[in-house]
Amino acid sequence: MRLEQNATADARNPNEDKRRAEKVQPYGKSVLITGCARGFGKLIAQHLDSKGFQVFASCLNPDSPGADDLRKRCSSRLQILQLDVTKDESVEKAAQFVKANLGSSELWAVINNAGIQKGFITELTRIQDFQDTMEVNAFGQVRVTKAFLPLLRKSRGRVVNISSIAGRIAPPMCGAYTMSKFASIGFTETLRHELDMWGMKVISIEPEFFETDLVAEKNIWMRVDDTFVSADEDVRKDYGEEFLRKFKTVLGRAFPPSPNMHILLGDIESAVSLKNPDAVYKIYRNPLIKFLGNVFESCPEECQIFLKNAYFRILGLPKPEEVNKIH
């Protein structure tokens, strides 16, 4: 009996694989992408334009060098529009622009890509940095999604939210960013259940660290300086200048990003094009990093803390001065 069941299951696999591999035709379908002036957003806009989708590429500054480069590299189907995901009025204007410029196409997908990173160690990070990060990375996705859902329901389209591995595994010393990405994934999973009744798909894209402006070493150093300079003087003394100085150099080496950002494009295309995409795409640079990430995620909390402490000691991060006094 078991052999017969396995044989039946094997016989169904080719049809199941074929069903999952079926694609929608890009022609007559539009995609809105946020944060297209650089990084992932710019690459995604170029890629989907090359596949035949009508792309609405939103930028905080539509006159930026990145936006100009998109105009030069992409087809006449691509349209640049201004969008600040933290402002209700800006999002509403963008929704009206898209609705007025769809032509004969339908809005098929919204890709919430816009993101920022501010703040590091919680005690040394301003509340404003937490608020700014949440406004873009979490509330921005909610704001944009709500504005475009009426159009997406008509097409039975989909929402694609760009989150991060930091939304599943909490890396230390970047609390505001991690908090926002956990919120993003929570919102995505809730929305998936809510929109299922409309026949719509909601997909979470969760890459590890790739070489975007967010993780460029010089930019990290600037943000560390900006964060620590505003910290309370008594708190700075507890941590000690040696810790603060080493933290800056260690953080640049702690999570070395991969330069191969194009790895993400295949999964983005699947999320947008497949009739039955996966709910979650976790994107790693290679199988080894994927294995290590999965192992760390499955470890007990005590093990994660031990591994984290050992890793930072290897990198040369000392304990804060006050910790040494206590011990």
Image (tube, helix red, strand yellow):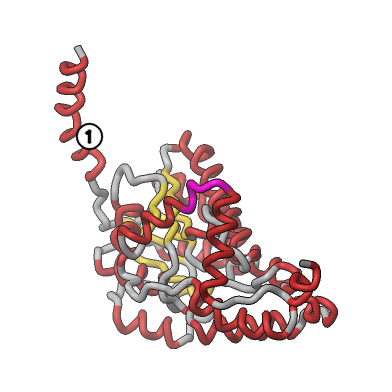
Q: Which residue is drawn at 31% across and 84% down?
A: 72
Q: In this view, does 301 lie to the left or right of 297?
A: right
* Front one among 273 and 253: 253
The x and y percentages for residue 275 are 30, 44
* Front one among 290 and 15: 290
The x and y percentages for residue 29 are 33, 56
Residue 78's place in the image compared with 68, above or below, is above
Quarter of image, res 313: bottom right
Residue 226's place in the image compared with 121, above or below, is below
**Residue 137 located within the stretch drawn in magenta:** no
Give the structural element (helix, strand or loop) at label 1. helix
Q: Outermost residue toward the front?
A: 327
The x and y percentages for residue 140 are 59, 62
Q: Can residue 135 be seen in this view?
A: no
Q: Is residue 44 left or right of residue 86?
A: left
Mark 1 sits on what residue? 16
Q: Which residue is drawn at 57% across and 67% down?
A: 93
Q: What stretch is highlighted in magenta?
A: 296-300
